[in-house]
Image (cartoon, helix red, strand yellow):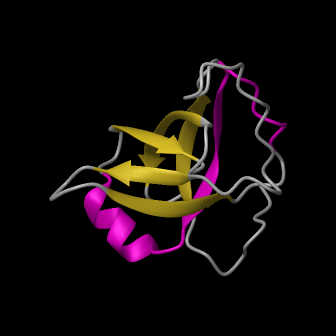
Amino acid sequence: MAKIYPEAIAFLAEIQLDRMDSAGNATVTMHAENARPMALCRRNGDMWYSFVLNDTSIDPILPGQATTCLVSFVNSEEAREVFPVTASILFGDGAVTKGTLRILSLDP
C-alpha cells in the first residue's frame, strides 16, 4: 500500500461509508485523493480529529461498502490515545458525508 503522505504515521483501518448522508440523500463515493474526513471522539465532550485516507492503492469507497486501508490522523499521537483498536468511531466530512471507522492496528 503506497502512502499519499509518507511522513505521516499510518494506521490500518476499516472504513464504511453510510448509504445515506445526514441530509437524507444518497451518499457520494469517497476518493482517497480528495477526502478529508474527521473522526469523532466523545471522551470529555465532542472532539473531531482530522484524518486522510493515506493509501493510493484503494479504489473509491462506495456507499455501504467496507474498505480496509491506511489512514493518518493530523494529530496521530493523540489519536493513538483516544481511539482504541477495534472500536467503532463515527466520522464525517463536516458537511453531510458520514460513516464508521475502525482502527484495526496501530502499526500497519
Left or right relative to 102: residue 82:
left
Q: In which quarter of the image is residue 47?
A: bottom left
Q: Which residue is drawn at 60% across and 19% down?
A: 24
Position of residue 101 measured from the top left corner of the image (x, y, whole percent): 49, 39
Position of residue 35 measured from the top left corner of the image (x, y, whole percent): 73, 52
Left or right relative to 87: residue 49:
right
Q: Residue at x 60, y 52 (%)?
A: 37
Left or right relative to 90: residue 64:
right
| Image quarter (top left, top right, bottom left or bottom right) of the C terminus | bottom right
| Image quarter (top left, top right, bottom left or bottom right) of the N terminus | bottom right
Residue 59 lies in the magenta-colored region: yes
Q: Nearer the viewer, residue 43 or 80?
A: 43
Say above or below: 1 vs 86: below
Q: What stretch of residues is rendered in magenta? A: 58-83
Q: Which residue is drawn at 78% across and 51% down?
A: 32
Q: Residue at x 75, y 55 (%)?
A: 55
Tally the numbered discs: 0
Residue 34 lies in the magenta-colored region: no
Q: In which quarter of the image is residue 54?
A: bottom right
Q: Which residue lies furthest to the bottom in this view?
A: 7
Q: Nearer the viewer, residue 69 or 94?
A: 94
Q: Residue furthest front?
A: 23
Left or right relative to 85: residue 51:
right
Position of residue 25 measured from the top left corner of the image (x, y, whole percent): 68, 20
Say above or below: 95 vs 43: above
